[in-house]
């Protein structure tokens, strides 16, 4: 059912939240647009400016690695300045109230952790861009270190320990999904009674399979997104409005 207007959407969502014992939110880039981080697919989103660099290209080409890091550094002011928005804060309030055991996110911006979720309770399907890792031995590096290395010769650095490329700790197209996170997300989805997909176009798989799985396991499904998704038809409630305005009333003290 599609909410006829914002106020009835908020009221229906409030009822579903009140009835639920275990809520699992599933977030995409749309929850962070009001924080100054563009999404991928909206007009002006990242894809309208840059073709994504697939994982095999990153591994094979120093030029691709240089370009990938140039783009990441260009985004640094946005990531560094971003503060949790109303959507993040509403979910953090429900988490503090014991309604949400953990959150599943496609986002890489660390804003759920900044809003008050314990890092262990944020299941990041696509990794995190606020730090980097060696793709060989997984040694962690900070973005500031990568930048200082890059600034010496305009070349993306390699791992000090094993010599393999250092990449932001995100999952690129063509890169294997993280097994532990996929397992945890599956378990959370199977055991919740309310699953809320927020700000995702639901076109990136396998992540987009989680709302469907929740519905198939008997949970109620809510989709909050300002444009239709392919899964609107199977949702119990669809709210086609701004996320901050929809979730703002659920921000606690
Ligand atoms: P997407 O860009 O495909 O979809 C975002 C959706 O949110 C769109 O349908 C858009 O219409 C909607 N939206 C944007 N702002 C909104 C608002 N204020 N209110 C309501 N709806 C709004 O994003 P996705 O589904 O998350 O998939 C893209 C991939 O991009 C993900 O894998 C994610 O890792 C990555 N990504 C992450 C970030 C981030 O961490 N903030 C930013 C860009 C891309």
Image (cartoon, rainbow, N blue to C red):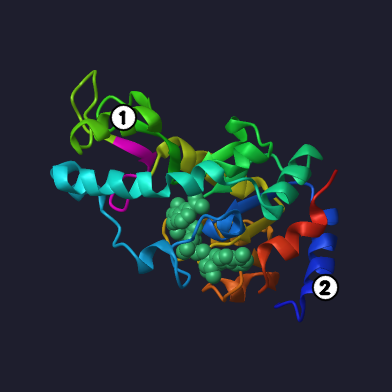
Q: Nearer the viewer, mark 2 or mark 1?
A: 1
Residue nearest the viewer, comparing 154 with 211? 154
Main SS of residues in magenta: loop
User: Which stretch did the figure color magenta?
Assistant: 167-176
Tell me how many marks there are: 2
Q: Secondary structure at mark 2?
A: helix
Provide residue 204's location: percent of width, then percent of height: 42, 61
Q: Is residue 171 visible?
A: no
Verify whether residue 158 appears in magenta: no
Task: State the image coordinates of residue 21 (x, y, percent, origin top left).
Answer: 79, 47
| Picture disc at residue 7 | 2
**Crowding near pointer 1: few (<14 within 10 Å), some, many (20+)?**
few
Q: Nearer the viewer, residue 236 or 196?
A: 196
| Residue at horizontal 54 percent and vertical 48 percent from the top | 105
**Residue named by callout 1:** 148
Disc 2 residue crowd, few under 14, some 14–19, many 20+, Cα 10 Å:
few
Can residue 57 be seen here? The reply is yes
Q: Secondary structure at mark 1?
A: helix
Whether residues under marks 2 and 1 lie with C-beta atoms below 8 angstroms apart, the answer is no
In the rendering, at what x and y percent does residue 194 appear? 71, 55
User: In the image shown, does 176 or 140 lie closer to the viewer?
Assistant: 140
Position of 179 relative to 161 (above/below): below
- For residue 172: magenta? yes
Residues at marks 2 and 1, CA–CA distance in whole angstroms:
49 Å
Of the 4 image quadrants, the one containing the C terminus is top right
92 vs 97, left or right, is left
Identified at 32% across, 27% down, the residue is 138
Whether residue 238 sits left or right of residue 124 in the image: it is right
């Amino acid at each position: 059912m599609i909410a006829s207007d914002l106020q009835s959407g908020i009221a229906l969502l409030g009822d579903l939240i009140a009835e639920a014992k275990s809520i699992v939110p599933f977030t995409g880039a749309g929850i962070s647009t009001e924080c100054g981080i563009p999404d991928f697919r909206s007009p002006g989103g990242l894809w309208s400016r840059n073709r994504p660099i697939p994982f095999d290209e990153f591994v094979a080409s120093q030029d691709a690695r240089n370009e990938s890091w140039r783009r990441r550094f260009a985004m640094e002011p946005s990531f560094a300045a971003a503060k949790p928005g109303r959507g993040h804060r509403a979910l953090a309030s429900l988490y503090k109230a014991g309604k949400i055991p953990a959150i599943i996110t496609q986002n890489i911006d660390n804003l759920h952790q900044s809003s008050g979720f314990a890092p262990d309770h944020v299941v990041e399907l696509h990794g995190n861009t606020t730090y980097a890792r060696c793709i060989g031995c997984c040694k962690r590096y900070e973005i500031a270190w990568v930048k200082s290395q890059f600034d010496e010769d305009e070349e993306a650095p390699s791992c000090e320990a094993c010599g393999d490329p250092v990449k932001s700790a995100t999952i690129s197209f063509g890169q294997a999904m993280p097994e532990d996170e996929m397992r945890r997300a599956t378990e959370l989805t199977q055991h919740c009674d309310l699953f809320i997909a927020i700000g995702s176009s639901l076109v990136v798989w396998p992540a987009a399979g989680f709302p469907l799985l929740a519905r198939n396991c008997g949970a109620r499904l809510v989709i909050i997104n300002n444009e239709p998704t392919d899964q609107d038809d199977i949702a119990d409630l669809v709210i086609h409005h701004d996320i901050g305005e929809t979730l703002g009333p659920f921000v606690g003290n």
